[in-house]
Image (tube, rainbow, N blue to C red):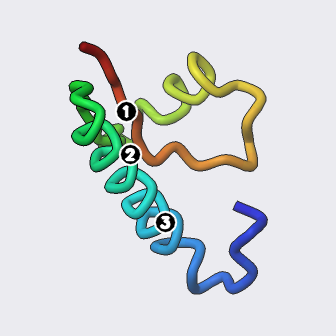
Amino acid sequence: MEAYKSPAERDFMPYLDAGVMIQSFYLACEVLGVKVCYVNPNIRENNKEFFKSRFFPELDEYKYLGAIVIGK
């Protein structure tokens, strides 16, 4: 998150950047014939602290934007 200097871009730019990376990953997997699935980061507000403590306790400066599952 420290890469985003303007406070105005901190709300939406991480999602745009993640979308570009996810699309590139999807295309690479398609070429390689690998199955891929994107997991939406739709976490309810009252579950955010639990999610953070369970999966990313030491990563305060990061923002979870989703996960990609791959397999054959």
Within 10 Å of the Cα at label 2, are there few (<14), some (14-19), or many (20+) other Cα atoms? few
Q: Report the residue that reaches farthest toward the front.
A: 32
- Give the residue at mark 3: 17
Mark 3 burial class by Cα count in 10 Å: few <14, some 14-19, many 20+: few
Task: Point out residue 58 in the picture as x, y percentages from the top left corner.
Answer: 77, 29
Residue drawn at the location 40% of the way across and 34% of the way down:
67
Whether tag 2 and tag 1 are in contact, CB under 8 A, the answer is yes
Residue at the image point whose x is 74% and y is 42% from the top? 60
Query: Which kind of residue does numbered mark 1 sit on?
Result: Ile
Q: Nearer the viewer, mark 2 or mark 1?
A: 2
- The numbered mark, 2 or 1, whose residue comes first in the sequence reads 2
3 sits left or right of 23 in the view: right
Residue at 34% across, 44% down: 28
Q: Which numbered circle lies on residue 25?
A: 2
Cα distance between the residues tagged 3 and 1: 15 Å
Work out whether residue 30 or residue 54 is closer to the camera in this orientation and state it: 30
Residue 33 percent location from the top left of the image: 22, 29
Helix, strand or loop under label 3: helix
Q: Position of residue 63 (x, y in %)?
A: 58, 49
Element type at mark 2: helix
Name the residue carrying label 1.
68
Q: Quadrant of residue 24?
A: bottom left
Q: Earlier in the sequence, mark 3 or mark 1?
A: 3
* Residue type at numbered disc 2: Phe
Q: Report the amino acid beneath label 3.
A: Asp
First-in-chain label (2 vs 3):
3
